Amino acid sequence: MKFVYVLTILLLGFSSSPVAAATPVLTLKAGGVAIEFTADELLARPDAETIAVARDPSYGKPMSYRGIPLRALLSALPSDLTDTIQARAADGFVAEIPRALISGAAVPWIVVEDASHPWPPLEGKAISAGPFYLVWQHPERAGISPEQWVFALAALTAVPSPLQRWPAISVDASVPEDAPARRGQLAFIANCLPCHRLGGAGEATVGPDLLRPMPATAYFTEAGLRALIRNPAAVRHWPAQQMPAFDDNALSEFDIDAVIAYLHHLAARSK
């Protein structure tokens, strides 16, 4: 385990870890401190366990992994007042996971691929979910989204919530608490913000911005947008397509209605 002070890295322009260039590492960051782990270091920890996942949404079937409880890993970081753990993947996918979910009824794990026993490739891809992968046991207990299972995980960072960092994506204070746009805001952050930005807000680089230069609600029909959210391959297809389909367990029809209401709300406000 290497303790690397972020300020030093920024000033000197290089990492103090001798394995950084050759070996994949998982980086945890909080309070201005970063901790790096290699796969071998994680697998050698005394709290590493073999766990069973009843249904892995990335593989579409039950899987068994060797991993470490995420709560135990995060306990090594300095305490702070942030309420979100940002899970960043190597491909530009960025999930914003509330700490309340991490400490709740579902159990998060960082599972680690053993290079001598690699995991199978993901469907339609030439890569596996490794070398580091955020998975959940009992996800149904907390409504964990498939987008909160982060494969090819590169970094976990303690950050303020998305609404604190990007107030422009928050619905207006005058909107009633039970309005669809408020439910849509929550559903969008969990399921869409990992890939899409909104008017520049967000950090993902996988999908297009849904407000700039034109709002998605302006160039999709209502039916087309609804169909695209449910299953993009049923609307359009191209070789580099990455957006998955969302079944009713991941996004109900009510959730999709709410996401569209949220996008309409933001688009109207941006005029």
Image (cartoon, rainbow, N blue to C red):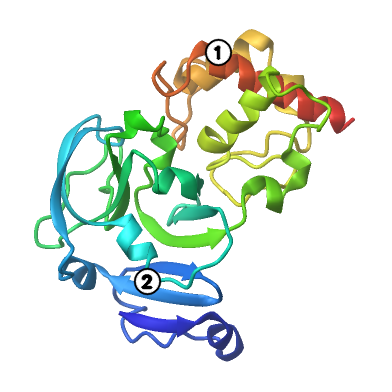
Which residue sits furthest bottom? 12
x and y, in percent, of residue 125 in the image = 30, 41
Residue at the spot 86% in from the left edge and 30% down from the top edge: 269
Quarter of the rendering containing residue 20: bottom left
As helix, strand or loop, the secondary structure at mark 1 comes to helix
Q: Which one is in front, 208 or 48?
A: 48
Which structural element holds mark 2? loop
Q: Can see residue 12?
A: yes
In the image as oriented, which residue stretches furthest toward the top?
A: 223
x 40%, y 34%: residue: 144
Which percent across, then down, holds residue 163? 68, 45
Q: Residue at x 42, y 88 (%)?
A: 16
> In which quadrant is the C terminus drawn?
top right
x, y percent for residue 270: 86, 33
Residue 7 pos. (x, y %)? 58, 84
First-in-chain label (1 vs 2) = 2
In this rendering, would 91 be left or right of 113? right
* Image side of residue 265 versus residue 134, left or right: right
Q: Which mark is residue 254?
A: 1
Q: Give the residue at the far right of this rendering.
A: 271
Can residue 94 be seen here? The reply is no
Tell me the amino acid under the disc marked 2. Ala
Disc 1 versus disc 2: distance between alpha carbons?
40 Å
The residue indicated by pointer 2 is 76
Q: Residues within 10 Å of mark 1 (few under 14, many from 20)?
A: few
Q: Eyeballing the image, is 8 above or below 151?
A: below
Q: Nearer the viewer, residue 78 or 163?
A: 78
Reply above or below: 12 against 21.
below
Q: Amino acid at mark 1?
A: Phe
Q: Quadrant of the N terminus?
A: bottom left
